[in-house]
């Protein structure tokens, strides 16, 4: 008795016109889809391990897994003689309704995915986005949470974050700040510059590279105005800025160099001056 594999594959399994071959193809496609979904979701989980909290990371991983699985099932269903035309029409209508109802949700979701992969911000960064300044507390699938400097939490939709100009104050390791420091005209400007540079150089968080710069910027009405450009680690920028300014002030005063008060010289016309003197003599 001879064995014909082709005849075996063409044997109906008792459900419509479905044969063993159709069932085999369906099974193979599903197995391949499961394997691809598992591999891709595992890689997504690893890639986002340092970028997202565990809950959001697992949610996104499951979303990727089931999307690939659904895609495999749609490809495999025709092997079971399943007519997808009616399902596609119904799904298209349902998709349109859901799409119009959830435009902002989908937009925030897609924007959140772009933020995860582009990575312009991360948790702990000091940023300014959409007129909100503060520290990034959480990056979720649909929104980003920012803790403002006064302690108020603000939830910003990811679409707003992605489409707005993002200022990240700590993305670069170093950040520059500047002072405008005025001294009296009778004080020695060169000595003031030397003292200021010495104070900057002795500060533990004032960077040597890029080097600080101190120079006379302009001659004001009441003072000789000096500008100081100083670089500090971005994470310590504010503390260095406030501490160093006070140290410079104290050191200048200790060396007899003062920051002047606004002053005016008043000139009198000759006639007015003579009248004033005559009035004083009569008194």
Image: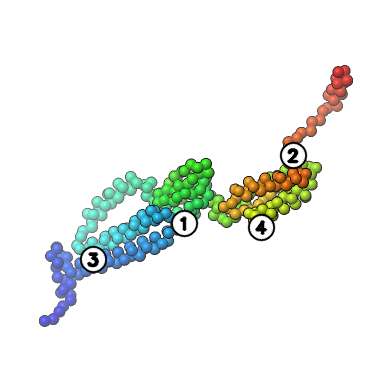
Q: Is residue 211 left or right of residue 150?
A: right
Q: Which mark is residue 26?
A: 3
SS at mark 2? loop
User: Which badge, 1 or 3, is on the more N-terminal residue?
Assistant: 3
Residue 180 image position (x, y, % from top left):
68, 45
Residue 28 or residue 200, whichever sits in front: 200
Q: Which residue is mark 2?
A: 260
SS at mark 4? loop
- The residue shown at (36%, 54%) is 59
Residue 220 image position (x, y, % from top left):
74, 41
Task: Bin the neighbour count of mark 4 within 10 Å (Cα to Cα): few under 14, some 14-19, many 20 and up.
Answer: few
Please say if the residues under marks 1 and 3 sit with CB atoms less than 8 Å apart: no
Residue 31 or residue 58, whichever sits in front: 58
User: Which badge, 3 or 2, is on the more N-terminal residue?
Assistant: 3
Please say if the residues under marks 2 and 4 sit with CB atoms less than 8 Å apart: no
User: Which badge, 4 or 1, is on the more N-terminal residue?
Assistant: 1
Please say if the residues under marks 3 and 2 sit with CB atoms less than 8 Å apart: no
Residue 239 image position (x, y, % from top left):
60, 48
Give the foreground label among 3 and 2: 2
Residue 160 image position (x, y, % from top left):
45, 47
Q: Is residue 88 left or right of residue 150?
A: left
Q: Which mark is residue 208?
A: 4
Cα distance between the residues tagged 3 and 2: 87 Å
Cα distance between the residues tagged 2 and 1: 50 Å
Cα distance between the residues tagged 2 and 4: 30 Å
Q: Residue furthest bottom?
A: 1
- The residue shown at (45%, 47%) is 145
Cα distance between the residues tagged 4 and 3: 67 Å
SS at mark 1? helix
User: Which badge, 4 or 3, is on the more N-terminal residue?
Assistant: 3
Residue 106 or residue 169, whichever sits in front: 169
Q: Is residue 182 left or right of residue 62?
A: right
């Amino acid at each position: 008795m001879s064995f014909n594999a082709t005849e075996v594959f063409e044997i109906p399994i008792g459900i419509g016109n479905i044969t063993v071959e159709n069932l085999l193809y369906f099974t193979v496609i599903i197995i391949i889809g499961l394997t691809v979904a598992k591999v891709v979701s595992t890689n997504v989980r690893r890639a986002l391990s340092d970028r997202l909290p565990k809950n959001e990371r697992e949610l996104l991983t499951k979303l990727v897994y089931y999307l690939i699985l659904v895609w495999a099932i749609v490809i495999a269903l025709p092997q079971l003689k399943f007519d997808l035309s009616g399902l596609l029409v119904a799904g298209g209508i349902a998709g349109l309704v859901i799409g119009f109802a959830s435009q902002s949700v989908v937009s925030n979701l897609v924007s959140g995915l772009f933020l995860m992969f582009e990575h312009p911000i991360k948790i702990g960064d000091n940023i300014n986005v959409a007129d909100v300044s503060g520290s990034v507390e959480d990056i979720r699938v649909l929104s980003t949470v920012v803790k403002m400097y006064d302690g108020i939490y603000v939830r910003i939709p990811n679409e707003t974050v992605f489409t707005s100009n993002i200022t990240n104050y700590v993305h670069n390791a170093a950040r520059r700040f500047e002072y405008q420091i005025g001294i009296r005209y009778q004080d020695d400007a060169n000595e003031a510059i030397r003292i200021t540079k010495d104070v900057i150089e002795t500060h533990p968080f004032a960077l040597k590279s890029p080097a600080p710069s101190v120079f006379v910027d302009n001659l004001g009405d009441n003072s000789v105005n000096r500008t100081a450009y100083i670089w500090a680690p971005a994470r310590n920028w504010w503390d260095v800025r406030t501490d160093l300014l006070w140290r410079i002030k104290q050191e200048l005063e200790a060396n007899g160099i003062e920051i002047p008060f606004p002053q005016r010289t008043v000139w009198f016309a000759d006639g007015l001056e003579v009248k004033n003197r005559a009035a004083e003599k009569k008194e």
